[in-house]
Image (spheres, rainbow, N blue to C red):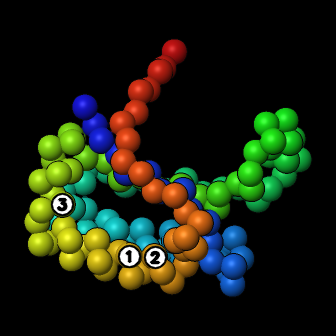
Amino acid sequence: MTLALTFCLRRLPSLSLEEFQRYWLEHHAPLVRSHLPALRAVRYAQWHALPVDPATLGLSRVRAAPEPFDGMAQLWWESREAFDASMKEPAAREAGRILLEDERRFIDLARSPIWINRGHVFEP
């Protein structure tokens, strides 16, 4: 079973969506990628929100949804055991410290939920 860490991101109020996404893609992504071996993660993905358009507004209105996130990130591990083992390693803890330090530069952490999960994929 694959395990994922999902992080729904909201940008710092001082950043435009474009500034946030540029920093996230051009600076933070290479930083995360460089730490994947220490974290024992097998995959990292970013999902960038598109500028709000009529379709998004309509979908949100129909569902009475809260404001959309600016993006979503996911890290994957092969199993819960692999994740748990990595979190005990000093190199993984140091990688986490470095990544959190960088996240404080562009993410509103207090408004950005994060959780561990497993997915179910359904394809045609």
Q: Between label 3 and label 2, give the one nearer the viewer.
A: 3
Asked if the residues shown at circle 1 and circle 2 are in contact, with their CB atoms under 8 angstroms apart, the answer is yes
- Mark 1 crowdedness (10 Å alpha carbons): few <14, some 14-19, many ≥20: few
Q: Secondary structure at mark 3?
A: helix
Q: Is residue 101 above or below residue 115?
A: below
Mark with earlier residue (1, 3):
3
Identity of the amino acid at label 3?
Answer: Met
Task: Residue 26: give x, y in percent of width and height.
Answer: 49, 74
Q: Residue at x 38, y 76 (%)?
A: 100
Task: Residue 118: give x, y in percent of width and height.
Answer: 36, 36
Q: Which numbered circle lies on residue 100?
A: 1
Q: Which residue is mark 2?
A: 103
Identity of the amino acid at label 1?
Answer: Leu
Asked if the residues shown at circle 3 and circle 2 are in contact, with their CB atoms under 8 angstroms apart, the answer is no
Q: Residue at x 47, y 21 (%)?
A: 122
Q: Is residue 87 above or below residue 30?
A: above
Q: Secondary structure at mark 1?
A: helix
Using the numbered discs, state the Cα–Cα distance from disc 3 to disc 2 in whole angstroms: 19 Å
* Residue at the extreme front of the image, as rendered: 110
* Image-quadrant location for residue 19: bottom right
* Image-quadrant location for residue 15: bottom right
Q: Which numbered circle lies on residue 87?
A: 3
Task: Residue 14: give x, y in percent of width and height.
Answer: 69, 84
Q: Residue at x 35, y 75 (%)?
A: 99
Identity of the amino acid at label 2?
Answer: Glu
Q: Secondary structure at mark 2?
A: helix
Mark with earlier residue (3, 2):
3
Q: Is residue 116 above or below residue 91?
A: above
Quarter in which the N terminus is drawn: top left
